[in-house]
Image (cartoon, rainbow, N blue to C red):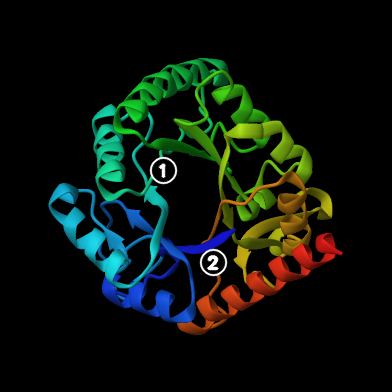
Amino acid sequence: MKLSVFTASTPDWEPEQAAGILAAQGWDGVEWRIVDQADATPPGFWAGNRSTWPLTGLEDRLDDIARITRDAGLEFSGLGGYANCRDHDNVERMLAATSRLGARQVRVTMPGVPSGDYRETFATTRSDLEWIEGRAAEHGVRALVELHHGTITSSASAAIRLVDGLDPERVGVIHDLGNLLIEGHEDFLAAFQMLGPYLAHVHVKNALWRATDEPGFDGSVIWRNEWAPLRSGQANVEAYFEALHEHGYDGWVTVEDFSTELPLEQRTADNLAYLRAIHERVTTRHDR
């Protein structure tokens, strides 16, 4: 198992700084965020993120991405793309970039839950993925469908319905611990078994639900979700690694921690130490 960081979660650092710090801390790889974004001061996770490469002009920056990653001694766990599956032109660009960089796999985003007929959106998305499957094969890479709240693939059950029958070497699924706390949670091991060969990548973050001051009907409590540190969110990270081990998953685990309780450099270092300790506990328990 190898550990990497998705740079959506490192907004304060320029790419060379991010790569250098992550490598010095001992991370195995990096998952670069690639998207056109709004400016923001100070930088944030979703706007003004300094560790993000713009989609506009991406092809002219691929040599820089490769050099910065290589010179730091990091591997690519994949690319964190935002091209929607219906945007065939930009999906094609992301697949080509993934191939040129040797990054092997790239996220392609799924439609949100529609206001109209879910079944129609689902069928259209399946057609898009069949096209993407062919293009991914042409480029020798894999497109990834993320389990994400608010989309048509918020659970493993939904994702396997969408990708079943496609080549798992060309279309895979990202299982995301934190997203599933918000929507789509299923038993960890059952979900991994359900996905089978389509389980291609893992994202780890944590979240929790808090009661708000918003009044509900007749005194009912209204809850909202927020991101939390890996150690203090509601998800049992050790149980998650236990299920991954039992399933035999030995691929990349990418951290995207959107909590802000700790300063960024301390946060990434602590996350690495925490996950390595959990991984060692799990493997030691099974090796006895």
Q: Is residue 197 left or right of residue 26?
A: right
Name which quarter of the figure residue 71 lies in: bottom left
| Residue lying furthest front | 288
Residue tagged by mark 2?
257
Is residue 246 visible in the rendered image? The answer is yes
Looking at the rendered structure, the secondary structure element under dot 2 is: loop
Task: Please count the marks in the image.
Answer: 2
Q: Position of residue 114 (x, y in %)?
A: 51, 27
SS type, badge 1: strand
Looking at the image, is 23 positioned above or below residue 4? Answer: below
Q: Is residue 123 above or below residue 254?
A: above
The answer to whether the residues at label 2 and label 1 have Cβ atoms under 8 Å apart is no
- Pinpoint residue 144: horizontal percent, then vertical percent: 47, 38
- Viewer-nearest residue: 127 or 100: 100
Q: Left or right? Give the position of 82 relative to 211.
A: left
Relative depth, front residue between 58 and 149: 58
Task: Tell me the amino acid under the disc marked 1.
Answer: Gln
Tell which circle, 2 or 1, labels the residue nearer the N-terminal end: 1
Disc 2 versus disc 1: nearer the observer: 1
**Residue at the spot x=40%, y=24% of the render?**
133
Q: Position of residue 56 (x, y in %)?
A: 18, 48
Q: Residue at x 77, y 43 (%)?
A: 189
Residue 105's tag is 1
Asked if residue 48 shows in the view, the reply is: no
- Tell me: residue 193, above or below residue 247: above
Examine the image and state in which quarter residue 199 appears: top right
Disc 2 packing (10 Å; few <14; some 14–19; many ≥20):
many
The three-letter amino acid code for the residue at tag 2 is: Asp
* Placement of the N terminus among the 4 image quadrants: bottom right
Q: What residue lies at 72% left-to-right and 44% top-to-bottom?
A: 185
